[in-house]
Image (cartoon, helix red, strand yellow):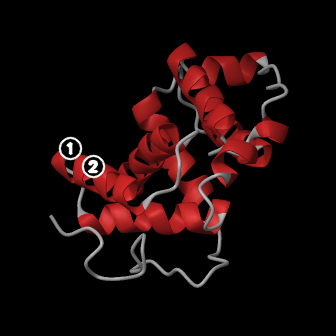
Amino acid sequence: MNERVLEIVVFMVTRLRGSVAETAYYNELAIDLQSRGFTEHEINLACSWMFDRYGSEVETLSRASKGWNSSVRVLSPREQTALSSRAVGYLIRLVKLGILRPTDFEEVVEACAQSGRHAMSIEEMKSIISGALFSEPRTTKFGPGANFHGDESSFAN
């Protein structure tokens, strides 16, 4: 399930970057995600994680990755063997979006390299990424059951 929450986070961060934080836009995103087969619970988990990571200001998304984008380190030969080129590209995209911090990137690359797999795909890697991102302790008042706006009706169709 965490892999699905990761997909929602990537979708939302991509769509929200550079957008004005308006309630109507969040509701549109939620409806769009539900139409793509994601559950309200998954959407709420992703939104809760985003609040934990970025705070309540969506504008933070634009600033969140500025310090993280300057460079991505070169992978060792062992790490290059463990990851497919598409998987490496996906990791770099997550860093550029500000979803993965440099320490998260290191954790994921090391876990992939230690897995013993050869040319791990994006789908195989998503569970490792999810573990790195969603295993962090929650730091805000938003819990796993909280929704984006803090009320039960915010994702109603």
Amino acid beneath label 1? Arg
Q: Is residue 101 left or right of residue 136?
A: right
What kind of element bears circle 1? loop
| Position in image of residue 16 (x %, y %) | 50, 44
Q: Is residue 121 visible?
A: yes
Vertical arrangement, residue 26 with respect to residue 82, above or below: below
Between 1 and 43, the one lying in front of the other is 43
Q: Residue at x 38, y 68 (%)?
A: 44
Q: How crowded is mark 2: few (under 14 residues within 10 Å), some or many (20 or more)?
A: some
The dot on residue 93 is none
Q: Residue at x 62, y 68 (%)?
A: 52
Amino acid beneath label 2? Leu
Mark 1 lies on residue: 36
Q: Which residue is drawn at 68% across and 36% down?
A: 95
Vertical arrangement, residue 124 with respect to residue 37, above or below: above
Which quadrant of the figure contains the C terminus? bottom left
Q: In this view, does 23 lie to the left or right of 89?
A: left
Which quadrant of the figure contains the N terminus? bottom left
Vertical arrangement, residue 113 with respect to residue 137, above or below: above
Q: Which residue is drawn at 44% across and 77% down?
A: 144
| Position in image of residue 21 (x %, y %) | 52, 55
What kind of element bears circle 2? helix
The answer to the question of whether label 2 and label 1 lie on touching residues, with beta carbons closer than 8 A, is yes
Mark 2 lies on residue: 33
